[in-house]
Image (cartoon, rainbow, N blue to C red):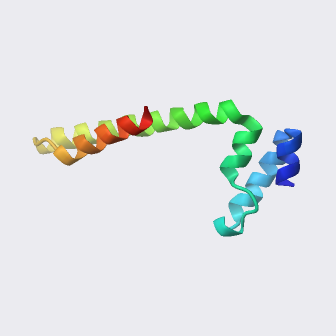
Amino acid sequence: MARFAMTTGDQILGAAVLSRLDAMRSKDRPVSAQELARTLVGEEFDEATTALRRIRETVQRAVVVNREFESGRTDSFAKIERGLAARRSR
């Protein structure tokens, strides 16, 4: 059914298949949920993934800044980690 939804572009069937895939163990899934989503909604999926990554980075940055403010010390490890995350997202 997943391949049929991907071939026909049927987003409703794809959503139903995704809900079933979610209930399965990852090694038993006949198709990747990301592959199905990318095929059915492609650009929207990529935009949402990018937005979620940016939100996650912003929240992490805020947590680190707050932690540094409360402790009165700079967390060098967190700064390096944020820099690497920013590099990966480019």
Q: Is 17 positioned to the left or the right of 54 in the image?
A: right
Is 89 on the left or on the right of 31, as rendered?
left
Label count reads: 0
Q: Is residue 63 above or below residue 31?
A: above
Residue sitting at 43 percent across and 40 percent down?
A: 56
The N terminus sits in image quarter: bottom right
Between 5 and 15, the one lying in front of the other is: 5
Q: Residue at x 29, y 37 (%)?
A: 83
Q: In the depicted view, which residue is nearer to us: 79 or 60?
A: 79
Where does residue 31 sit, x and y in percent of width and height?
74, 57
Q: Position of residue 72 (x, y in %)?
A: 10, 41
Residue drawn at 36 percent across, 35 percent down? 86
Q: Judge from the rendering whether residue 39 lies leftward or rightward of residue 26; answer left or right.
A: right
Residue 2 lies left or right of residue 70; in this view the side is: right
Quadrant of the snapshot with the C terminus: top left
Give how far across and how far down residue 40 sits, in percent: 77, 39
* Vertical position of residue 60 compared to residue 23: above or below: above
Quadrant for residue 47, please give it: top right
Q: Quadrant of residue 71?
A: top left
The residue under the point 23% across, 37% down is: 65
